[in-house]
Amino acid sequence: ICSDYRKGILTEKVFSATTHRASNSKKRVLVDPKSSNFELYKGATIITPNQFEVEKAVPIKIVDKIDLDRAAEYLLNLTHAELILITRGKNGMTLYPNKENPIDIPTQAKEVFDVTGAGDTVVSVLAMALAIGLNYKDSAWLSNIAASIVIGKVGTAVVSLAEIDEYLHEEILRTSKSVLNLEELTKIVSLAKSVGKTVVFTNGCFDLIHGGHIEFLQKAREKGDLLVVGLNSDRSVKAIKGNGRPIKTEKERANIISALKSVDYITIFDENTPEEVIRQVHPDILVKGNDYNIDEIAGREIVEGYGAKVELIPIVKGLSTTNIVTKILENHKSN
């Protein structure tokens, strides 16, 4: 890594010797530039300027993204670099591989306190990622995340591997879909637990969603950081409730539940009980409504067996899918 701070050390002679030795040993050379004369950096593999540094180095007035693309092409032709990674502040960064289409990488920063050290972070994490075998795109993406963490701190700061790891875990949890198969769910739950999340699990048919269901799920979610709902499949609802049920298909029921803010993830199970799901998911808390006796709760012994908790939540009396269906049928007959 050649970080040019314009202190007189990274002269043309020094840089030329560096690139010559790197070429002989088949090593990459990454440059974080400061000079407006990019001819100095001929022989570099990767150059990581910010947009302001690019503007000073090219005979092109940069007004929009098209101008920036032209400027990057100019610098690639000038330096013969394999790629140029331009950091663009609130617009993230753009990766320009030589003779390939540019790749825009949006910023990941939640808050910006101090941009000091962002460039150093980008080039160092980029180098580390390439050294362990990641491709250019993934390496740039990782360096973008690291820089986003650094600018959220005050003053010159460093980013730790643990911070990057936690960020990646949180991002996977945030962007993953809601309705998962059991294999997908167990991976997500494992990630959640690795960053200290408390996982709550409940299950049911949730055929005709009513106010009682919504209040129950809200209270369940308050017990932890993540609420997973095991949803009985159409086959298992019919086996439990009898012919004529479910009224709504498992896909419809899953879509409705996934729209609730209180629910993080849903998995559909085909068995009559959620015991296999509970074995795989290993929730920290298993919750059911207090219309159940605690000894009747499916999965209780499994959960208590590995030291987790079973809790009962008060339900809204008089509200149930069966009661709603009965009332609809009675009204239909009377009409």
Image (cartoon, rainbow, N blue to C red):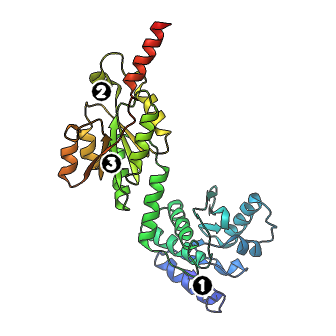
Mark 2 and mark 1 lie on one chain; the one further toward the N terminus is: 1
- Estimate the spatial distance between the alpha carbons at disc 1 and disc 3, rounded to whole Å: 52 Å
The residue wearing badge 2 is 236
Camera-side mark, 1 or 3: 3
Identity of the residue drawn at 27% across and 24% down = 240
Label 2 amino acid? Answer: Ser
In this view, the residue in front, 227 or 91, is 227
- Whole-percent x, y for residue 21 in the image: 51, 83
Residue type at tag 3: Thr
Q: Disc 3 on helix, strand or loop? A: helix
Q: Left or right of 122: which side holds 37? A: right
Camera sees residue 134: no
Q: Position of residue 140 (x, y in %)?
A: 54, 64
Q: Mark 1 sits on what residue? A: 16
Residue 71: name its quadrant.
Answer: bottom right
Mark 3 or mark 2, earlier in chain: 3
**Disc 3: which residue:** 186
As drawn, 23 above or below 182: below
Q: Are marks 2 and 1 in contact (CB under 8 Å)?
A: no
Residue at the location (35% across, 61% down)? Answer: 194
The answer to whether marks 3 and 2 mark residues whose Cβ atoms lie closer than 8 Å is no
Q: How many marks?
A: 3
Whether residue 73 is visible to the viewer of this picture, yes or no, is: yes
Task: Point out the tag, 1 or 3, that comes first from the N-terminus.
Answer: 1
- Relative placement, left or right, of 223 versus 175 is left
Residue at x-position 43% and y-position 12% = 330
